[in-house]
Image: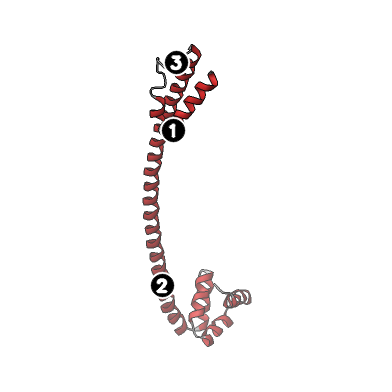
Amino acid sequence: MIQRTLLLAMTILFCSGSLSAAGSGLVDEEKISSVEERRILVSIEEEYAKLDDRKSKIDTQEMQLKTLEAEVDKKLAAMQQLRNELVKLLDRKDETEGERIEELSKIYEKMDPQKAAVLIKALDYQLAVDLLLGIRKKTAGKILDSLDAETATELSKAFTEIR
């Protein structure tokens, strides 16, 4: 008898397609033949109600997640745009620095090699290398010749390294 009731309830559940539709109306006083069957059907209806409530909460959470996902996508797009702008600015900065180093190289090239050597020794290492790379090789050789051996060696090694 209990098995028949459970089988009947499960059949109603699977055939209905909707939890609320399957859960409502299980307890029909005319069709109930025992107290145990009534208790089981009431229990099933309570489970349907819980499942409906849980489904609505999950639907709400899914909607919230989709909203958050859209916000994250917008922020990622904005960050990518800012990143692209930053790359452009850095490229422009590098280009401007390169132009200025070229101009400074021309100035150092026209200087007396001994005076240029004194100034280059006081400069930042990378700037000194960049300046020497921009100077004609003959003039750069004279400047390196005017430097002490250790500094000249370090700067000479920089000519072989690839940046």
In three-dimensional space, the C-alpha distance between marks 3 and 2, rounded to whole angstroms, equals 88 Å
Q: Where is residue 52 in the image (x, y as percent from the top left)?
A: 41, 29
| Residue located beneath label 1 in the image | 15
Q: Nearer the viewer, residue 158 or 147?
A: 158
Q: Position of residue 97 (x, y in %)?
A: 42, 71
Q: Position of residue 146 (x, y in %)?
A: 57, 81
Q: Position of residue 51 (x, y in %)?
A: 44, 28
Looking at the image, residue 24 lies above or below residue 105: above
Q: Which of marks 2 and 1 is nearer the N terminus?
A: 1
In three-dimensional space, the C-alpha distance between marks 2 and 1, rounded to whole angstroms, equals 72 Å
Q: Nearer the viewer, residue 20 or 138?
A: 20
In this picture, residue 39 sits left or right of residue 68: right
Kindly identify the amino acid type of the residue bearing the numbered disc 1: Cys
Q: Nearer the viewer, residue 80 or 22?
A: 22
| Residue located beneath label 3 in the image | 32
Which of the two marks, 2 or 1, is nearer to us in this view?
1
| Residue located beneath label 2 in the image | 95
Kindly identify the amino acid type of the residue bearing the numbered disc 3: Ile
Looking at the image, residue 27 lies above or below residue 153: above
Secondary element type, mark 2: helix
Q: Earlier in the sequence, mark 3 or mark 2?
A: 3
